Image (cartoon, helix red, strand yellow):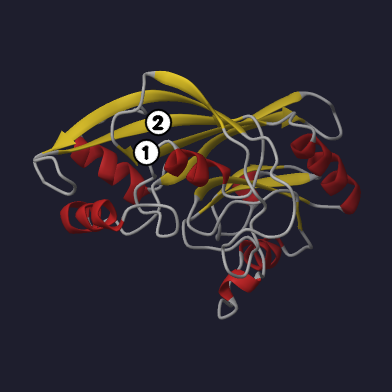
Amino acid sequence: MTAASAPAGLPILYLDDWLVVVNKPAGLLVHRSPVDRHERRFALQLLRDQLGERVYPVHRLDKPTSGALVFALDPATAQSLASQFEDRLVEKRYVAVVRGWPDEQGLIEHPLDPVRDDRMVAAAGASKPALTRFRRLCAFELPRRVDRYPTSRYALLELLPQTGRRHQLRRHLAHVSHPIIGDTTYGKGGHNRLFAELFGSRRLLLACMRLAFRHPVSGSPLAVEAPLSADFAGVLARLGCTALD
């Protein structure tokens, strides 16, 4: 089966007999979760119906995050791919719009407590090491006051998580006082409202643009790129950022 022959539905970035990679839209849960008990649509369900066969999630993206998401087409492949994620053998590249102007590049090294799904608060358990590398791609300044300054600064970052903790990127950026725009849990309401007012953006501006791993059957390197959704790309266009063009 090829991507071209797949039915319409979730955008398919890669498809073979063992796995499929889709471009998940923001606002869609990967699978049923206590976080949103009222939700009735999930990426797993939609893709299963789209392909006409069972699919197996091997990692997750938060509901408000868009981008590349991998599913296996059989249990053995699911286990093989999940092991690569757990063993930190998968290269993950994200982009995010954040408040302020972080350094040109850097490493955020900050342990994170477990997060319980149902209330977004720390669950029982010890903190675990968490590492995120970042690089600044664009910087912008808007002539609007949100905090104590007469203008507001923002940046587009490339984010390379070296570990895979729950909400790692969102929590790490908030920890260094550069929260991701649109984050209603860890972000800043004033900046979120400004982007909604100026650009009509009410989503989390975080997207997974690339996943690279070993094919679980052939062992060959496989890299899958996910284009930005139109709403995210539209915000960057309005800000004059061409770093991803």
Q: Is mark 2 on a helix, strand or loop?
A: strand
Q: Which quadrant of the figure has residue 182?
A: bottom left
Q: Which of 242 and 105 is in front in this view?
A: 105
Q: Is mark 1 on a helix, strand or loop?
A: loop
Q: Residue shown at 43%/43% (left/top)?
A: 174
**Where is residue 161 drawn, in percent x and y?**
59, 32
Q: For the residues marked 2 and 1, what is the alpha-carbon distance in whole angstroms?
A: 10 Å
Does the residue at mark 2 contact the one at mark 1 (Cβ under 8 Å)? yes
Which residue is under mark 1? Answer: 178
Q: In front of the other: label 2 or label 1?
A: 1
Residue placed farthest to the right in the image? 76
How packed is label 1: few (under 14 Cα within 10 Å), some, or many (20 or more)?
many
Sequence-first tag of 2 and 1: 2
- Residue 30 in view (yes/no): yes
The C terminus: image quadrant: top left
**Horizontal relation, residue 217 to residue 242: left or right:** right
The amino acid type, in three-letter code, at marker 1 is His
Q: Which mark is residue 35?
A: none
Using the image, determine if residue 18 lies above or below residue 189: above
Q: Residue shown at 66%/65% (left/top)?
A: 31
**Horizontal relation, residue 208 to residue 33: left or right:** left
How packed is label 2: few (under 14 Cα within 10 Å), some, or many (20 or more)?
many
Q: Residue 157 carries which label?
A: 2
**Horizontal relation, residue 118 to residue 55: left or right:** left
**Horizontal relation, residue 76 to residue 119: left or right:** right
